[in-house]
Amino acid sequence: MNERTEQTTLVLDNPAGAQVETLSVEVIRAWLIDKISELLTIPADQIDTQEQLTNYGLSSMSGVILSGDVEQWLGLALEPMVAWEYPTIDALAQYLADEVAKRAAAV
Amino acid sequence: MSTTLTAHATVTLAAPTTMSDVLRLRAERQPDERVFTYLINGEEEGTWLTYGELDRQARMIAALLQRHTRPGARALLLYPPGLEFVAAFFGCLYAGVVAVPAYPPHPARLQRSLPRLQSIAGDAKPSVALTTAKFLDSADDIARIAPVFQTMRWLQTDELTDVSADEWRAPALDGDDLAFLQYTSGSTATPKGVMVTHHNLLANSAYIAQASRYCEMTFTPESVLVTWLPTFHDMGLIFGILQPLYSGFRCYVMPPAAFLQRPLRWLQAISRYRATHTVGPNLAFDLCAQKITAEQRATLDLTSLTSAINGAEPVRVETLERFAEAFAPCGFRRQAFVPCYGLAEATLMVTGARKPDAPLSREFQAAALEQHRVVPAGARATDTRTLVSCGHVLADTRVRIVQPDTLRRCAPDEVGEIWVAGPGVARGYWHRPDETEHTFQAYLSDTGDGPFMRTGDLGFLYEGALYVTGRIKDLIIIAGANHYPQDIELTAEQSHPALRAGCGAAFSVEVEGQERLVVAIEVERRWPKQADEGETANARAAAAEITAAVRRAVAEVHELQVHQVVLLKVGGIPKTSSGKIQRRACRAAFLAGSLVAWDDRA
């Protein structure tokens, strides 16, 4: 369920602004699981990607901090409340994958 | 108490009696001087305001308000981050309308943000709601969900075309008139609007200016402040916005989300604009130390910063050490830290005055503190607690340490409730006479001295400096001994690896006439990580093992019997939006039987 897959260019801890090519939903999902695991101190293998993040105790502040970490990694500008607009890891991963693909197509 | 302002000329201006007077005077003397600059996304300069322009916008908004309200009416202020809020706030002051700043509801979080706003609206009964043209569009959505908003006239205060600043007629106001209602204390069920008068605002601003002189970090016309604090919150409004205006120096304002998304922006702005002063809650300094990389630090020059005010939540010595160490290479000086103590009921600051080389913290004997006695720890002491000094009390503010049950003044080496008197103490809670009397009209039972405001916080004065140890209402008193819940929670979470850190609540309940201890704490999901068969039996055995570990640890460390250990699923402990454990809510849920136990799910 929560496996990592290597696909195309995967650049972790990418300095903001640097371009990242396409990233699969699976890679983004895996990264989000790790990040949320760290942020909310929940072991990664116990995170359900369809669970509402607020049910894991995601506060408004930690949600904005998370959006900043994602911005940093993907070099995208994101709404601070993106984790509420896409309130599960699955929804958020899909949205981010779409945004990254849009940017790659625009080049 | 009269206060004076100084402008560039070394001429003292006429004494203002209201905060509106302050802006009027500055607009008269220094109309073209820029006071506020808004940094969009915390980086690019967006809008800015001179004293003259802010005065003009305030007069326009006040004229608009005067068409629809009379002095004393309340106005709800719902603004996104930016300077529109500042103009609207002063527009209210200029019209004699009582401003009620509130957290603006976000479309993606209406469920979460509306109840509190409804509760504030129901309490303050504002006749108008002020907002931006853009926000006005969502007004209908909000009003549809919560009818109380239909009772208000919604007005936009930006992009005004049919109002002239000349229409404004200055109302007759004095220092005793209300400036605004601050709803930061109180819960959604019991909103408490602190009534802040013009006199309170002027007194507190003067007090903060005096503290800056004491700290040898005096505000001058060359001072520069950088703030990202939300402006509807007392520290963000009173220190972030009103202080620069009162003391006559420049301020750069960025949205809170810009800081939270990229903490580097805060320190970059300090570096770029050569800020002398900044302010933040304790967690902000932790976030910087955690998120900002070494390469990013190499780009920062924090040598201009003389004052880093740390307030609004308990200050932790570990945070100060960590930040100072991380940013020393950038030129940050540890002595710049100014830990403060304050609360909305005192307008903002109670203490925050420290000499640059005075200690930031001191060690005290832990066992003595538990007995509410203050005993400084010797050099080779082992069982100690390090407490941060929140500075000295100055001028005509008075602090007393009082026994919360007998209301007698404490001995100098005794921990007690912090009581405050002075011109910064607010008038009371809006339309809550009982709570107002209890909180704002307290008298010492031995000397009859008073009235004082009871803060509900525990602490003591040592060598003239205030140290805060905890909150009264959370204190657990069993068999005459005092126990701090945070200490019990720490013991509990450390007693077994299955327990989640920072996810426990300790409180007491009355059982057959006696106070008994309850510890509710979250367990890691699916502990132990076993196969499916026999899961129920395994879960029950695990629960028994964890419970036993908690009881054993609490008995050993605190000499307390735990009446009930409640193991909860992940997320089962009620917390505020900033992650603080809500012990009272947990206790209420426990008594109502609505806590979700961990082994229910097995």
Image: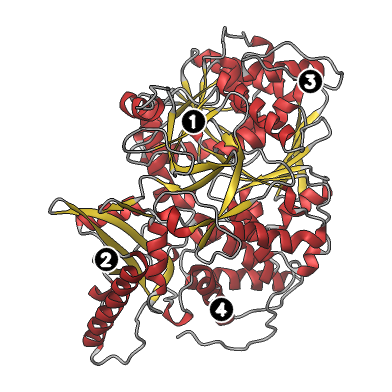
Between residue B62 and residue A98, name the one nearer to us: B62
* Amino acid on which the number 2 mark rests in the picture: Val
Task: Specify how the rendered protein is coloured.
Answer: secondary structure
* Contact? badges 3 and 1 (CB < 8 Å): no
Whole-angstrom CA distance, mark 3 to mark 1, is 29 Å
Q: Identify the mark nearer the N-term, 1 or 2.
A: 1
The residue under label 1 is B420
Residue B104 in the image: x percent, y percent?
Answer: 51, 41
Whole-angstrom CA distance, mark 2 to mark 3, is 60 Å
Whole-angstrom CA distance, mark 4 to mark 3, is 60 Å
Whole-angstrom CA distance, mark 1 to mark 4, is 56 Å
Q: Are marks 1 and 4 on the same chain?
A: no
The residue under label 3 is B6
Q: Are marks 1 and 2 on the same chain?
A: yes
Closer to the observer: label 1 or label 2?
1
Classify residue B117 by image quadrant: top left
Q: Are marks 3 and 1 on the same chain?
A: yes
Q: Are marks 4 and 3 on the same chain?
A: no
Question: Could you tell me which chain the residue with mark 2 belongs to?
Answer: B
The residue under label 2 is B596
* Amino acid on which the number 1 mark rests in the picture: Val
**Neighbour tally class for label 3: few under 14, some 14-19, many 20 plus, Cα within 10 Å:** some
Whole-angstrom CA distance, mark 2 to mark 4, is 33 Å
Closer to the observer: label 2 or label 3?
3
Up-down: is B411 above or below B477?
above
Q: Residue reaching furthest right?
A: B9
Residue positioned 34% across, 37% down in the render: B190
The residue under label 4 is A25
Up-down: is B183 above or below B396?
below
Closer to the observer: label 4 or label 3?
3
Up-down: is B54 above or below B460?
above
